[in-house]
Amino acid sequence: MPTSIVIRPRAEDVEGQPILRPLPSAQCRSVGPFVFFDHMLSTAYPAGSGMNIRQHPHIGLSTLTYLFEGQIQHKDSLGSDQLVNPGDVSWMTAGSAIAHVERTPDALKQSGFRLHGLQVWLASPKEHEQGPGHYSHHPAASLPVSEVLGVKIRMIAGSGFCLESPVPVLSPTLYAEVQLQTATSLLIPAEHQERALYVLDGDAELDGEAVQPHTLIVLEPGQSATLCAQSDCHGVILGGAPLDGPRRINWNFVASDPARIDEARQRWAAGDWPQVPGESERIELPPSRR
């Protein structure tokens, strides 16, 4: 298997939602622009309950939310208020300061539901770290799909496999959902310098070696790899061009300059931050981990 790193994610809990987080890790800080990867595990919420991630800030990154089950309501300080369904892309670029809320819609909470999905952070190139924020929603039907000989590829963001997503990424990016039927295979070309594979479920082999579900496999730069499905297999492939320099991550802030992190922490603590319309609750600044 032409791999350099195999990352087993750590288990976390975000406002009651169990997740697995392979990025960032001590083994690998980023893959292309991706600096943060959360797998929101499939979770059953009984009627009357749901996820509620209160108002919180971001700088220097874009968040991308992609669901397999359930719904999320996205609200932000730009005035966006969007219901996100399975297969949609919710894309938010923070710029120098943005705040948002993610919660279960009231209608869904009344009946009970399952939630399963992914949220990733992509570090903004240095030239886009400052400036205004941006939000866009891309319905599932707008994402390009290839389906040949039992292999289905949906390009979530960026480009690859002769597909290009409409999501307005800020640097060369690869983010694709792949579904392989039993006994099919997929060649992962070296068309992006950095790439990684995350298998959500199913039995698979990468260049003849077994792949454990819920592990992030970072592929060797410049080398193609072949993914073979031993059973129906579901995963994502992510990557892109290397970052234009190291990034520091502190709480919800990403920056190439540590001074911007310090300034953002001070501003949020002081309440000097754009607010999400109609929202009063917020997540308070945690102690610094320095």
Image: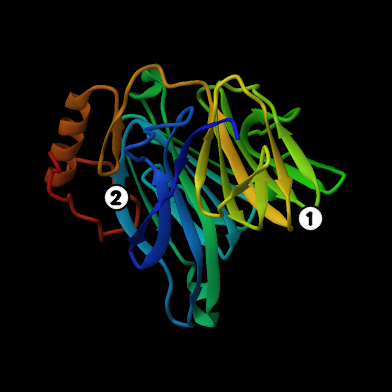
Judging by the rendered image, the residue that carries numbered circle 2 is: 56
**Mark whose residue sits in front, 1 or 2:** 1
Q: Secondary structure at mark 1?
A: loop
Q: What amino acid type should be assigned to the residue bearing mark 2?
A: His
1 or 2: tag closer to the N-terminus: 2
Q: What amino acid type should be assigned to the residue bearing mark 1?
A: Thr
15 lies above or below 93 = below
The picture quadrant where one finds residue 124 is: top left
Judging by the rendered image, the residue that carries numbered circle 1 is: 182
Residue visible at 31% across and 30% down in the picture: 96
For this rendering, which residue is in front, 188 or 278?
188
Q: How is the image coloured?
A: rainbow
Q: Position of residue 289 (x, y in %)?
A: 15, 43
Q: Position of residue 56 (x, y in %)?
A: 29, 50
Query: Residue 271, can we see it?
Result: no
40 lies above or below 196 = below
For this rendering, which residue is in front, 140 or 28?
28
- Going by the image, does 48 lie left or right of 207? left
